[in-house]
Image (cartoon, helix red, strand yellow):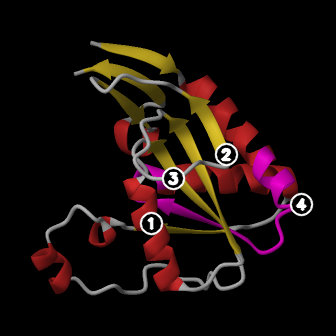
Amino acid sequence: MAKEIIDAIGMKRALMRMTYEIVERNKGTENLVLVGIKTRGLYLAQRIAANLKKLEDVEISVGAIDVLQYRDDLPESKKEKMIHNQQLDFDITDKNVVLVDDVLFTGRTIRAALDALMDQGRPAKINLAVLVDRGHRELPIRPDFIGKNLPTAMNEEVKVSMTEVDDKDSIELINK
């Protein structure tokens, strides 16, 4: 059974609030880049960039990283066959990177994303923006920008739907 927690308007508001917080924390947009974790993190990063364009009239570089090859729960035999390669088409060295994802849970995806980012360059700093923080961390990772804190039980799942891939915007809580 699914219960809608945030609708399209609520999601838009949360992203706009996060955009303002990103500008404030970075004291503007100079040297700012957005990197979304595939798949929905990329679309969220693109939406934040569009908000920045409206607010600050600047074009911010947006890229995507695929963290699958960096996961610590992959068997070593698969890891050995993978090549860590360039994923971004812009340099992040000395940039203020905002790493964007849809749901923060255990922190393992973010740890993998940090490894992937470090293979791309050496940023001046990295901030984390997540649409939903559901708790249950297994690693000492915390977001800098949060759309919605949503404490969950382990038998619940958070489903983020986005028009780019799901034909609607919503955040639902699902009992497994």
Task: Tell me if residue 132 comes above or below residue 52 in the rendering.
Answer: above
Residue 31 among those drawn in magenta: yes
Contact (CB < 8 A) between labels 4 and 3?
A: no
Q: Label 1: few (<14), some or many (≥20) within 10 Å?
A: many
The amino acid sitting under disc 4 is: Lys
N-terminal label among 2 and 4: 4
The amino acid sitting under disc 3 is: Pro
**Mark number displayed over residue 27:** 4
> Which is more foreground, mark 2 or mark 3?
3
**Mark number displayed over residue 1:** none
Residue marked by disc 3: 140
Q: Secondary structure at mark 4?
A: loop
CA separation, marks 4 and 3? 26 Å
Task: Give the quarter of the figure containing the C terminus.
Answer: top left
Which quadrant of the structure image shows residue 164?
Answer: top left
CA separation, marks 1 and 3? 14 Å
| Depth order, front residue of 65/114 | 114
Residue marked by disc 1: 113
For the point 47% across and 33% down, the residue is 134
